[in-house]
Image (spheres, rainbow, N blue to C red):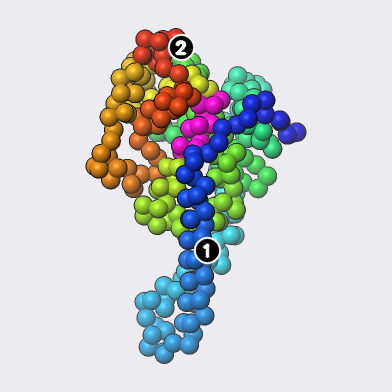
Amino acid sequence: MARHEPTVPPPPRHPAELPFLAFMVILNAAIVVVIVLAAFVVPFLPDALQDSAAAYAVRAALIALLLLIPGLIVVRELQRASVRGTAVQLSERQFPELYRTAEDFAGRLGLRRRPDIFLANGNGALNAFAAQATGHDYVVLSNELFAHLHENNRAGLRFIIGHEMGHIRLHHVALWYQLAVAYSQRIPILGPTLSRLREYSCDLHGAHLEPDGVTGLVLLAAGRHVETDVDVGELLQQGRQLRGFWVGLAQLPRSHPFTVRRVERLIDLGLLRVPVTGTVGAGFR
């Protein structure tokens, strides 16, 4: 597909994402260097130490390092093949409205190619994800999200699609990105922190593309049956009160920020609109 030129500049990342990413890339490189150096040292150790658990661990880490690139490529290609074989791909005839939404968002974000959009059986899970394989970007939406947002609140689903396209635009799913943090993102606390910053950055994209899409986040907090009955004003106040030591500690191992905090930040930045009466099902101001 020909490259689209964005009519409005896409939003920036969360201000802390790139500095933290740089730290994680440097840390990842240091880990790789340590593995390689340790692998060179092991053959020169006494025989007794060569059979130690530490020596076996170094050998295993070196093998994993050598297989990292081909292993990631295989996983990415198998994942796309699985999605194509088990999910419904949107097209001009298959859910055409959302297909056109994806086309529009790709243009507004200046993406090199329009991602394929798939509707998958989520087996009850409220989930969506973006991914990449050789020559292809794609987004997968679970039917639990789709069923309750498509008919009653398309804006919420548009927010979710925009969020996932943000992952593509910011290269979070690119092979080079995954290689650059392959080891450092496995470190507790540090890996989840980088993940949360990525989610904040992609929330900016979702709100940029659909400022009326607060239901896309409310759904995650309230569930799929009552998302349109939630008073967003009250949820906003709840987010503003979500402070303190225990809140910060509870969030450290999480890959995603607390949902009510995501709502609060986007509304306070003026990127998401609050319904006039507070509930999501009402008109927006």
Residue found at the very far right of the displayed protein: 2
How many labels were placed on the picture? Answer: 2
According to the picture, the residue beneath numbered tag 1 turns out to be: 29
Neighbor class of circle 1 (other Cα within 10 Å; few <14, some 14-19, many 20+) is some
Secondary element at image label 2: loop
| Residue that appears at 36% across and 32% down | 261
- Front residue of 203 and 266: 266
| Residue that appears at 30% across and 42% down | 248
Residue 170 position within the rendered picture, expressed as x and y whole percent measured from the top left:
57, 41
Kind of residue sitting beneath label 2 = Arg
Query: Can residue 203 be seen in this snapshot?
Result: yes
Query: Can residue 213 be seen in this snapshot?
Result: no
Residue 112 position within the rendered picture, expressed as x and y whole percent measured from the top left:
69, 38
- When asked about the image quadrant of residue 235, the answer is top left
- Front residue of 198 and 56: 198
The span picked out in magenta is 199-209
Residue 257 position within the rendered picture, expressed as x and y whole percent measured from the top left:
38, 38
* Residue 204 among magenta residues: yes
* Residue 240 among magenta residues: no
Left or right? Give the position of 214 relative to 90. Answer: left
Kind of residue sitting beneath label 1 = Ala
Left or right? Give the position of 236 relative to 97. Answer: left
- Front residue of 18 and 64: 18
Vertical relation: 271 (above or below) 196: above
Left or right? Give the position of 274 relative to 62. Answer: left
The N terminus lies in quadrant: top right
Mark positioned earlier in the residue sequence (1 or 2): 1
Magenta stretch, main secondary structure class: helix
According to the picture, the residue beneath numbered tag 2 turns out to be: 285
| Residue that appears at 36% across and 14% down | 279
